[in-house]
Structures are given as C-alpha cells and as structure tokens.
Amino acid sequence: MTRIDAKFADLKTNGKKAFVAYVMAGDPDFDTSLEVVRGLPAAGVDIIELGLPFTDPMADGPAIQLAGQRALGAGMTLDKTLALAAAFREQDDTTPIVLMGYYNPIYSKGVDAFLTAAKKAGVDGLIVVDLPPEEDSELCLPAQKAGMNFIRLATPTTDDKRLPRVVQNTSGFVYYVSITGITGSAEAEAGDVAPEVARIKAAAGLPVIVGFGVNTPDKAQAIASVADGVVVGSAIVSKIADGLPVADVLKFVKTLSDGAHRA
C-alpha cells in the first residue's frame, strides 16, 4: 500500500473528500517553493502534486507554463525537484507526493535511475501526461514494480471504447480532466462532471479526482461533492506568480481545502 492508497483509505473511513494541491517545483525559486510545499499539509492539503518544470508543457495553460518558465529560469531541474521532495520528506513522512510532468526529463535521466531516485526521495506516484497507455512498458509498469502509483488522466473525450485501456494499469486514483482544453482555461461544472465520474469509477474501481477549472472554495466544494476529491493548480500558482508572501498563499490554499472538505 502506497501513501496514496493509505490516504484514500483514511479519507473514506472519515467520510471526507480529498483536496489535492498542485504547485510547480522551484517556482519562483527552490527555497520559496519548498516553504510553500512544507506548508501545504497544515493548509488542509491531502495530496501534493509537484510539477516537474519542462520547456514544452502541452497540457498546461498560461499560469502553469509561466510557473515552469520561472522555475527553469531559477535553475530548477529534475534532480533538484527530487531534492525538494526529499527535503519535504525530512519533516513529513505521511503526506503523499505525486510528481506531475512530461516524459522527456525522465527519459533523459534514464527510467531506472529516475525511479530509484524518485523512490528514495519519497515520491509516491507519477502523472506523465504525454505517455499513452500504449507505452505502459516504458514507464508505467516499471514504476508500479518499483512501488509507485501510476496515475492516468481521463477526459471528456475518453469514450467507452477507450476508457478500459486508459484505466487498465492505472493505480492510486484516476485524474479526471473536467474540461476539454488546457489548465486554467474554463470552469468545471458539477452537473457535467458527476456522470463522468460515475462512469470512470465503474470502469476503474479507483477513486476519481477532478481537476482543471476549479478556482474557488465554492467550486471546490461543488466538484468534490460529485467526486472523490478535487485538484486545484492554476489558481494557486497564480497567487505565487503575484508575489504573495508564502503565508498568504497558504491562507488561500486553506480556503480551497475547507471548501473541498465541506463536500
């Protein structure tokens, strides 16, 4: 059982929904980013999604693209991202960390070397958005063999024919992308999301967490009420981009987590 599996078991026991926060590793710099990440659990975050900076983030909207550019400009790398995760683990051995990004940096490092380093750093799961199920032998299956969850994305265009293939080797949870488009580009609607969550849960037998298009406490509550939890990324990253003090960023995160936990 990974930390992710344990977290969902605990949430289910307590009748709570999951709040997942995405932040870009190294944005705006290593030390500030680490301070934010270390403060997330106390702000009500159940699972941390740690963005891996990449030059060509095809699924991400302007807010997260710019966060990646700031991080890369500050010298962030894959190895430094893992070092940040390891530094977080020195003070927190229970909150799950999901590394979210693209395959190129992992491929460049080498899959075996990456998995060994990620596991040592305390990473619990991976979301690699540009590796389709047809490439499961590339990273998904080795990651699971190494004891990490490999989390797949489903979207509004994932039809009943495609869905079984998408969830076949998925573990931990399924990330449902609630809108067609890039991150931060539109708002999710609970009425549209609910039947899709039910369909994916039936196919996967896993918790379904909804992301993209969630940016307020009320929206977090509405979406979490029809899913197993909710992810917020662009709205948090935008507060960091505005140069808010870390304490104020974490206060904003707390309003979102409170919304999700009311569901």
Image: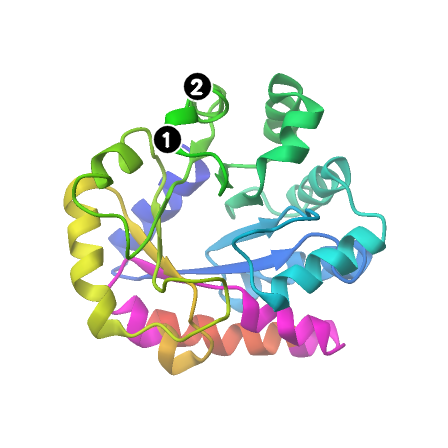
Residue 32 forms part of the magenta stretch: no
Which of the two residues, 58 or 111, is positioned nearer the viewer here?
58
Which of the two residues, 33 or 106, is positioned nearer the viewer here?
106
Q: Quadrant of residue 164?
A: top left
What is the distance, in whole Å, between disc 2 and disc 1 at their CAs?
9 Å
Residue 232 forms part of the magenta stretch: yes
Q: Quadrant of residue 112?
A: top right
Instruction: Look at the picture and state if 221 lies above or below 27.
Output: below
As drawn, the residue found furthest toward the right would be 74
Quadrant of the drawing holding the N terminus: top left
Q: Position of residue 240 (x, y in %)?
A: 69, 71
* Amino acid identity at mark 2: Ser
Residue 209 visible in the shown view: yes
Picture residue at 48% right of the left edge, 71% below the top? 185
Residue marked by disc 2: 137
Q: Position of residue 20 (x, y in %)?
A: 46, 58
Quadrant of the drawing holding the C terminus: bottom left
Residue 121 visible in the shown view: no
